[in-house]
Structure formats: structure tokens, C-alpha cells
Image (cartoon, grey):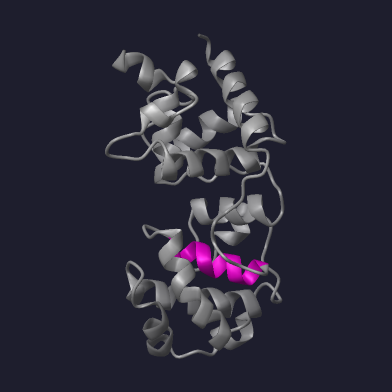
Amino acid sequence: MTIKERYQHFIDYFSKHQPIAETELNYSNPYELLVAVILSAQCTDKRVNMVTKDLFERFPNANELAIADVEEVFEYIRSVSYPNNKAKHIVGMANMLVNDFNNVVPSEIDELQKMPGVGRKTANVIASVIYSKPAMAVDTHVFRVAERLGLTTNAKTPLAAEKQLVKYLPEEVIPIAHHWLILHGRYICVARKPKCDKCEITHFCKYYSKLK
């Protein structure tokens, strides 16, 4: 099977069986999504959603968060991973959002990455989800699933995986393909023991073909 054929199988299956795929983070505006994605680094969406409910009630916009005491923010997010750093990051991000970006979450990857706590993955999520740009955010799920399926080959870093995925995926598919890979990795192609017996795409999965 050629790489192009594998990608076509991937697109055909998920377009039919999962035509709507969205982030599982709860948010109602770009500011909230940006905070949630920063908090989600090395943390589950479920856990993030548990803390953001009260966090957003207390700090409903960037103006409020920008003047927040970091220690108070920490108390709201203490159950997520690395709460000390993340508390500093989201307050710093809010400051920059208000003072440097006129309270408008930027759409450009380079601009987004200027803010504290915003790496390339987070920037790609915002560009993709909020602005529907052809940006492929590569987290641990995307990195793992893309390699197992054979969509990427010998990609040693998330950036390398991102470049391979963007090369072969049509631009209009990239935003939703990100969610296809994440959700498949979260519920079927899990890290320690993938649920191949429940998987419906083993017919083009490189990992599964090696198992046989």
C-alpha cells in the first residue's frame, strides 16, 4: 500500500464514520479555549474541564485574569499537571492578550507563540479550531496514532510528524483530521494496549499488519 493510498483510506473512513469531530475541551470563546489548551498540556481534557468551570466563573475574560493573583489562580487549577507553571503562564498570557493583542486572540502561529505557555501545539490548536486554518497540532495521541497507522514514518519529533501529515492531507481536511487522530488515540488506539479487536481501520493500519 502506498502512502497516498493509506491517507485516502484514512480520509474515506473518518469522513464517513466521523464527519463531525471536535475538541472535548469545554469553552465558549477563543479566550477560554486558549486557557483550556494551555492547561491541557500533559493533562486530560476531562480534568481540565473540571477546573475551568469555576476558573471561568471567577475570571470570565482576559482583563480579569490579567490582574489576577497567581496564587489565587493556582488554587483553582491545583489538580491539573504542573499547576505552578500553568498559573503563571495563563496570567502572563492574559496580560499579553490584553496589552499586546487588544484582547483579540491572534490567528497566526508565530503571534500565538509569543504568549507565555503557548507552544507550537497550542498555537496550532487555536489556529485550527478557532480560525479553521490548515494547522496540524501534534500531541501524544496524534504522534502515536499517525505512526501506528503508517501516516508518518520515522518522525522523531512532533514537528517532523506535523510536516509529514500536512504534506499528504488536503488543506480542508487538516483541521478535522487532527481531531480524528486524537479521538482514535484516546478511545481505541490507546498507548499501552491498543484495542485492535474493536478497531475498524485495521485494514490499512501498518501496526496491525505487523501484528499479523
Give whichever of 62, 78 is nearer the camera: 78
Give the vertical position of 56 relative to 124 (above or below). Answer: below
Question: Is 33 covered by the magenta stretch?
Answer: yes
Q: Identify the residue at image location x=53%, y=33%.
A: 163
Q: Is residue 149 above or below residue 124?
A: above
Query: Total number of numbered labels?
Result: 0
Camera-side residue of 88 and 191: 191
The answer to whether residue 117 is seen in the rendering is no
User: Could you tell me residue 14's position as x and y percent?
Assistant: 61, 32
Give residue 182's position: percent from left, percent from top: 49, 43
Residue segment shown in magenta: 30-40
Does the image show residue 121?
yes
Q: Is residue 138 left or right of residue 82?
A: right
Q: Measured along the vertical axis of the image, is residue 107 above or below residue 70?
A: above
Q: Residue at x 64, y 79 (%)?
A: 98
**Image x and y of residue 39, in percent:** 45, 67
Q: Main secondary structure of the magenta part?
A: helix
Q: Residue at x 43, y 45 (%)?
A: 186
Q: Of residues 118 and 178, which is closer to you in this image?
A: 178
| Residue 11 sits in quarter | top right
Q: Residue furthest left?
A: 192
Is residue 193 rendered magenta in the image? no
* Residue lying at 28% horizontally and 36% vertically, measured from the top left: 193
Q: Nearer the viewer, residue 24 or 195?
A: 195
Q: Please identify the residue farthest to the front as the structure is shown.
A: 198
Q: Is residue 174 left or right of residue 192?
A: right
* Percent x, y of residue 150: 44, 22
Q: Is residue 106 left or right of residue 6?
A: right
Q: Report the residue that reaches farthest toward the top.
A: 1
**Quadrant including the C terminus:** top left
